[in-house]
Image (spheres, rainbow, N blue to C red):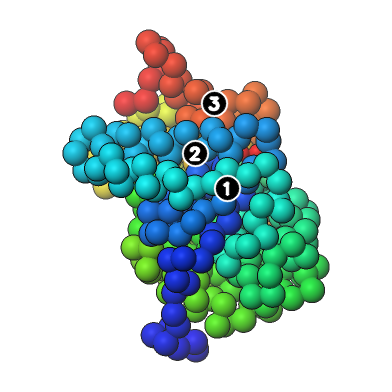
Amino acid sequence: MTDHTTATALPDSSVVGVIGAGTMGAGIAQVAAAAGHPVVLFDAAPGAAAKGKEGVAGQLGKRVEKGRMSEADRDALLDRITVVDALEGLSDAALVVEAIVERLEVKQEVFGTLEDLCGESVILASNTSSLSLTAIGAGLKRPERLVGMHFFNPAPVMQLVEVISGVATDPAVAATVHATAAAWGKSPVHARSTPGFIVNRVARPFYAEALRVLEEQGADVATIDAVMRECGGFRMGPFQLMDLIGHDVNYAVTSSVFAAYYNDKRFLPSLVQKDLVDAGWLGRKTGRGFYDYAEGAETPEP
Ligand code: NAI
């Protein structure tokens, strides 16, 4: 076992690169900047990184309004996040956290490019929800530098970070990421790379069985959510949570776990969810999922 107690967190002065400025990347950039790091944020979609930073500004603005943060602290935090329009902007990073689309070949390509751009000692971290860290790192010249750093949604709020080691991951790299996440105020846990890791593996039946009750017309979305909140003790029902996560992401995670377990029927993806993905009804981020988030909508979230 790694001795986690002796690992040192990255110093605040070290640059943290974040790739992908969507739901998770923007939140991770906020967390790293809040811990004092200079952060460089990149997204392949034009304007997306600037939009991600605007989202962070919006979140921090609410804290300022509530008196939980001073304007000076907000401005200083935002000043630490630099938006760049090319991957080359991340070349000085000591740690790069990738939070792009949940597709193995796209992540492999990005890390392959980064390996040549960044310095020898850079730590390459993926926020993947379910993909094998061993497979993501397989094509790298130095796969020992690749590790999973799996935040939960919303990243600035949720405490847990799963630190995932693939077959080739250097235990010292995993220990540094663990110590860094702890220094960022998170509660990290170590895990080996198995499909879905801990949380997304254990949570699959929560989504899958709720979707099956719906498909069998056992109860509607709002009823199932209400039952799980009120009697199950969950803060959010399964449909609310899937709308928050994003159906594209949630469906990709189920599909990846299903494939990784040789099409084990326990993890069979839902056609109802695939329909939402095909329709572009991805949940909160597109304004429509199982619930309608438009103002005055007929089926608003409870
Ligand atoms: P998202 O769809 O909100 O954002 C993804 C961003 O990545 C988009 O802005 C897109 O333009 C950008 N992107 C796609 N390909 C790119 C590339 N090749 N280079 C640079 N940027 C690229 O997705 P979200 O929800 O932030 O998920 C990102 C990753 O985080 C996925 O791997 C997902 O499985 C994982 N994750 C998602 C959680 C969630 O609740 N949504 C929770 C924890 C992990």
Query: Would you name the residue on which mark 3 appears?
Result: 286
What residue lies at 36% left-to-right and 37% top-to-bottom?
A: 59
Judged from the image, the quadrant occupied by ligand 1 is: top right
Horizontally, is 273 left or right of 156 in the view?
A: right
**Crowding near the residue tagged with mark 3, few <14, some 14–19, many ≥20 C-alpha atoms within 10 Å:** some
The residue indicated by pointer 1 is: 41
**Spot occupied by residue 147 in the image (x, y as percentages of width and height):** 60, 69
The kind of residue on which mark 2 rests is: Lys
Q: Secondary structure at mark 2?
A: helix
Q: Residues within 10 Å of mark 2 (few under 14, many from 20)?
A: many
Q: Position of residue 218 (x, y in %)?
A: 44, 31
Q: Give the structural element (helix, strand or loop) at label 3.
A: helix
Q: Disc 3 marks which amino acid?
A: Thr
Mark 3 or 2: the one toward you: 2
Q: Residue furthest left?
A: 67
> Disc 2 versus disc 1: distance between alpha carbons?
8 Å
Please give the name of the residue rendered at 29% of the width and 34% of the height, measured from the top-left corner.
Answer: 62
Say above or below: 273 vs 79.
Answer: above
Q: Which residue is mark 2?
A: 53
Viewer-proximal residue, 89 or 232?
A: 89
Amino acid at pointer 1: Leu
Mark 3 in CB contact with mark 2 (< 8 angstroms): no
**First along the sequence among labels 2 and 1:** 1
